[in-house]
Amino acid sequence: MEDTLTSRKPRTRDDLLFDGLINGILLFVLIVTLIPLVYVVMVSVTPMGEKSSLFLPPTQWSFSAYIELLKQPAMLRAGLNSVIITVGGVLVSMIVTVLTAYPLSRRDLPGRKIISGLILFTFLFNAGLIPLYLVIRDLGLINSYWALLLNGAVSVYNLFVMKNFFENLPDSLEEAARIDGASELQILWHIVMPLSKPILLTIGLFYAVTSWNNFFDPILFFSDREMMPLPVILRDILTGLNSADYAESTSNTTSHPEALKMAAVVLTTLPMLLIYPWIQKYFTRGTLTGGVKE
Amino acid sequence: MKPDLTAEPPQDTPLPRPKTSTLKRLMRHQALYVLLIPGLLYFVVFRYWPLWNAQIAFKDFNPTLGVEGSPWAGFKYFIQFFESFYFSQLMTNTLIISVAKLVLGIPPAIILAIAIHEARLKWLARGAQTVSYLPHFLSWVIVFGVLLALLSPSEGLVNQAIGALGGDTIPFLTSPEFFRSVIVLSDIWKETGWGAILYLAALLSINPTLYEAAEVDGATRWQRIWHISIPGMLDVIILVTLLRLGHILDAGFGQIFVLYSLPVYSVADVIDTWVYRQGIQNFQFSLATAVGLFKGLIGLALILTANRMAQRFSGRGLY
């Protein structure tokens, strides 16, 4: 906006200094954010016997660390678990969140303030870890994927963002449909949902990221190692815990042990990098200021 | 969950309706209540049932007797915690880590937002912005891997640099002197870009004519930042600071849980990590619940206070 205004004037020394500083800050952020990530990728492709270094790229790229990881049944199993947890988590979360947000967005619903208040209270105060653990145990959900899908079903923040979005939709379409005799479910499905695509995508992606990154709940609620998702396995690989599972691969390995670790980091991050451009595109709308009420 | 029988009549109905009885109003909305069932069940089972279970903080919990069957113990476990040597250590660690994240974490986000807003090279601003969000979406386990690549004593980039300069390698992640710095700096690395969004939104909502007028009056760009941008962000800065003060007892459980290890417990153990170890690993259910409840109650009081202050100072609140 001010570009055209100021760029016509001759630049003063002060102005150049200012621009230099601004560009310097931005460049610094760009580099400091990217270097660690680039370095991880570089280590992951460094062949055996070579030392990884940032300024000397490996003489040749070796993908043997990736191949070895992908050949391991434990790794594939963990990947499958992650997919189950993420897909199931998004489905359950979106269904429950939409079904809760829609009635609460209706200003004429008796009791909506009290229900919203009770939900908000759980956001401000919770009983802590152990009482929740006892609930999951009493429900018989230990070592069940449902423990994760149900415990993470609703994020209060996402719920209120969605509710605010629904509240701001024009009422006239809904009214018209109601006069035509449409049921609430039909109105929700045929009118509200199509109008809410941006927010549904944003929140769906948020739930997907949360489920994919879910690390603590599996440790807490699963004892069966077969059920652990990628983040848990990744930490075991990084810390060298439970190395028995990976002993085979690390003893007669052809890859660098560090390369193996970093390849596991990249593999766990990959889905995130694939959906990141989508997140980027959608999240700015609605969610950023949606949480802050005037 | 009981529907609200005392609710005020609907306020913005399009047509004035004849007064109907409460029962009729509830009946008219029965389909909506049916839709609410899964959500309400979720909150009752997974959020309110744990509150009921929290009574074991005041009981000698015995798994075979169950939550209700276990005998009452009064404030025994609270007193045990307050008198233990852990109390001061956990509070110290929690507060140091949390306050350092707050004090050192907010200025970079503000500076980044100003830089993005002031940049003339739009591609650079967009690039820095896009890239700076990314770490927010990575889990702490991933960041742990990144930190190993940077900091591990044998292969880590930083230790390679130290070695090249003739220094001794430093085991950052396992030495008590450095661990908190790693926690705070990695948090800044991960969250600065995300934190800048709110400040940037505040900057973008400033009326551009203010900047134009200042320029006509001969203000330098430094002066425009100082007299227009900073005041324009002040409400949001106050709001964010107060709300983070409300969460001062949350030092970042996920992060510390992934990054810490036995050698650094003395400087890294916070309330949440201790509750996990005592409760889940050592089966001290009642003690861990008492500590969790203590933290929750202090947290609730802080959040309510912070929110009230935010509303007073800036006219805005989160809740």
Image (cartoon, rainbow, N blue to C red):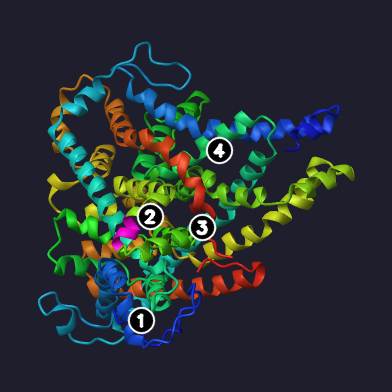
For the residues labelled 1 and 2, say whether their Cβ atoms are less than 8 Å apart: no
Residue under label 4, please give it: B129
Work out whether residue B251 or residue A49 is closer to the camera in this orientation and state it.
B251
User: Which range of residues does the magenta coloring cover?
Assistant: A185-189
Instruction: Looking at the image, tell me whether mark 4 or mark 1 is earlier in sequence order.
Output: 1
Q: In the image, residue B97 lies at what x, y percent? A: 48, 57
Q: Quadrant of residue A151?
A: bottom left
Instruction: Looking at the image, tell me whether mark 3 or mark 2 is earlier in sequence order.
Output: 2
- Local packing at callout 1 (Cα closer than 10 Å; few below 14, some 14-19, many 20+) is some
Question: Can residue A220 be spotted in the picture?
Answer: no
For the residues labelled 4 and 2, say whether their Cβ atoms are less than 8 Å apart: no
Q: In the image, residue B11 lies at what x, y percent? A: 50, 78
Tell me which residue sits at (56%, 68%) in the image: B317
Q: Could you tell me which secondary element the residue under label 3 belongs to?
A: helix
Tell me which residue sits at (37%, 65%) in the image: A178
- The residue type indicated by label 4 comes to Gln
- The residue type indicated by label 1 comes to Arg
Q: Residue B110: which disc? A: none
- The residue type indicated by label 3 comes to Gly
Work out whether residue B297 or residue B184 is closer to the camera in this orientation and state it.
B297
Q: Viewer-nearest of labels 3 and 1?
A: 1
Residue under label 1, please give it: B25
- The residue type indicated by label 2 comes to Ile
Q: Is residue B33 left or right of residue B206?
A: left
Q: Could you tell me which secondary element the residue under label 1 belongs to?
A: helix
Disc 4 to disc 1, C-alpha distance: 50 Å
User: What's the magenta bit mostly, secondary-structure-wise?
Assistant: helix
Disc 3 to disc 1, C-alpha distance: 30 Å
Disc 3 to disc 4, C-alpha distance: 20 Å
Q: In the image, residue B87 lies at what x, y percent? A: 40, 71
Residue under label 2, please give it: A191
